[in-house]
Image (spheres, grey):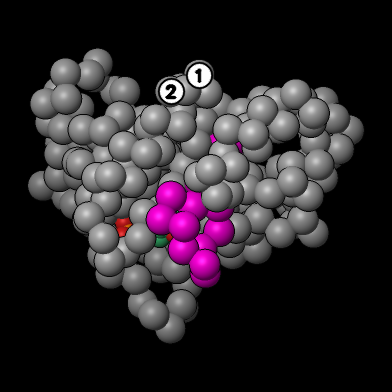
C-alpha cells in the first residue's frame, strides 16, 4: 500500500472510531519543500487537495501543475504577508492563516474588488507561543466577530498548530471550543504525528506532510 493509501485508511478509521460521518475529515497533503516527483506521484494517485506554506514557492510549483491536472484544491497554511495577498488569492481556494487586523482589512479590500472570496480560517496561537503566528486565544472571539461584522469576511473556521513539545489534545480541545462557540464548521488541526487525535477532537481538515511524502529535505531544494 502507498503511504497515501495508508494515511487515507487511517483517517477513515479515526473518523469511524469518533462516530463521525465518512468523509468528514478532509486530508490536505502538505507538499511544501517536497520534490516534484513525489508530488506528481500523489497527483497521479488521484489526490487533489494540497497544503503549501509559502505563496511564492506554491506559485512556482502549482501554476504549471494546474495546467496538467484538473480540480486542484490549494490551501495556504503558512503566514500571509499583506504584499502577497493578490498572488495568494489567485492561487489558493482556502487560506488558513488569517490572524491579524491589518491582514483582515487588506484582504477585505481585495476580496471586494474581485467580488470573490476564498474560504478563510482564523489561525489561533493556542499555545500562546511568542514566536508563533496566530491570534491570541483570549482575543479569538472578538477577532472573529470583527472579521465578520466590520470586514464582511466569510469566516469558515479556525486553524492551529499546537506547541511541538506538549501533548496536543488540550490544544485541539481548545480550538474546537472556539469553533463551536462561534458557530464555525471548519477546524484545521492535526499533522503527521497527531492527526488521529485531532480527528477524535473534531478536526475537519488535517494537514499531513511527511507521513505522505517522506521526510522533507532541510536544504529546501524543490525540483
Ligand atoms: C509543514 C506543516 C504541516 C505538515 O507537517 P508534517 O509533520 O510533515 O505532517 C502541517 N501544518 C503546517 C502549518 C505546516 O507548516
Secondary structure under the numbered disc 2 in the rendered image: helix
State which region is magenta.
117-134
Decide if residue 164 is on the left or right side of residue 181: left
Q: Is residue 139 visible?
A: yes
Seen from the viewer's position, the closer of residues 188 and 5 is 188
Read off the residue under disc 1.
183
Residue 5 or 79: which is nearer the viewer? 79
Vertical comparison of 176 with 135: above or below: above
The answer to which quarter of the image holds residue 23 is top left
Q: Quadrant of ligand 1?
A: bottom left
Ligand 1 closer than 8 Å to label 2 CB: no
Q: Which residue is painted at 65% across and 37% down in the image?
A: 143
Residue beneath the point at 60% across and 58% down = 79
User: Which residue occupies the foreground of this view, 102 or 95?
Assistant: 102
Q: Residue at point 19% right, 41% down?
A: 196
Side of 38 where 48 appears, left or right: right
Q: Is 178 rendered above or below residue 184?
A: below
Residue 127 vs residue 28, the one in the foreground? 127
Residue 182: % across, % down? 52, 23
Q: Relative to 45, is 177 above or below?
A: above
| Residue lying at the far bottom of the rendered structure | 219
- Dot 2 alpha-carbon crowd within 10 angstroms: few under 14, some 14 to 19, many 20 or more: few
Circles 2 and 1, Cβ within 8 Å, touching? The answer is yes
Residue extending furthest front? 138
Residue 111, compared with residue 84, is above or below; it is: above
- Residue underneath mark 2: 180
Residue 33 screen position, x and y as percent: 45, 68
- Is 147 displayed left or right of 109 in the figure? left
Where disc 1 sits, the SS reads loop
Amino acid at each position: 500500500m502507498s503511504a497515501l493509501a495508508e494515511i487515507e485508511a487511517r483517517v477513515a478509521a479515526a473518523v469511524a472510531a469518533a462516530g463521525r460521518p465518512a468523509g468528514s475529515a478532509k486530508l490536505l497533503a502538505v507538499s511544501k519543500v517536497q520534490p516534484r516527483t513525489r508530488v506528481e506521484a500523489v497527483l497521479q494517485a488521484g489526490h487533489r487537495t494540497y497544503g503549501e506554506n509559502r505563496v511564492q514557492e506554491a506559485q512556482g510549483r502549482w501554476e504549471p501543475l494546474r495546467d496538467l491536472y484538473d480540480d486542484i484544491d490549494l490551501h495556504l497554511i503558512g503566514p500571509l504577508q499583506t504584499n502577497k495577498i493578490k498572488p495568494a488569492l489567485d492561487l489558493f481556494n482556502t487560506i488558513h492563516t488569517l490572524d491579524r487586523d491589518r491582514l483582515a482589512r487588506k484582504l477585505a479590500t481585495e476580496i471586494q474588488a474581485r467580488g470573490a472570496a476564498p474560504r478563510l480560517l482564523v489561525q489561533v496561537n493556542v499555545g500562546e507561543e511568542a514566536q508563533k503566528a496566530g491570534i491570541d486565544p483570549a482575543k479569538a472571539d472578538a477577532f472573529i466577530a470583527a472579521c465578520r461584522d466590520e470586514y464582511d469576511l466569510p469566516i469558515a473556521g479556525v486553524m492551529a498548530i499546537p506547541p511541538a513539545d506538549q501533548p496536543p489534545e488540550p490544544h485541539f480541545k481548545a480550538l474546537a471550543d472556539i469553533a463551536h462557540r462561534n458557530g464555525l464548521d471548519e477546524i484545521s488541526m492535526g499533522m503527521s504525528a497527531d492527526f488521529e487525535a485531532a480527528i477524535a477532537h473534531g478536526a475537519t481538515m488535517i494537514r499531513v506532510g511527511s507521513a505522505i511524502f517522506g521526510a522533507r529535505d532541510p536544504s529546501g531544494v524543490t525540483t
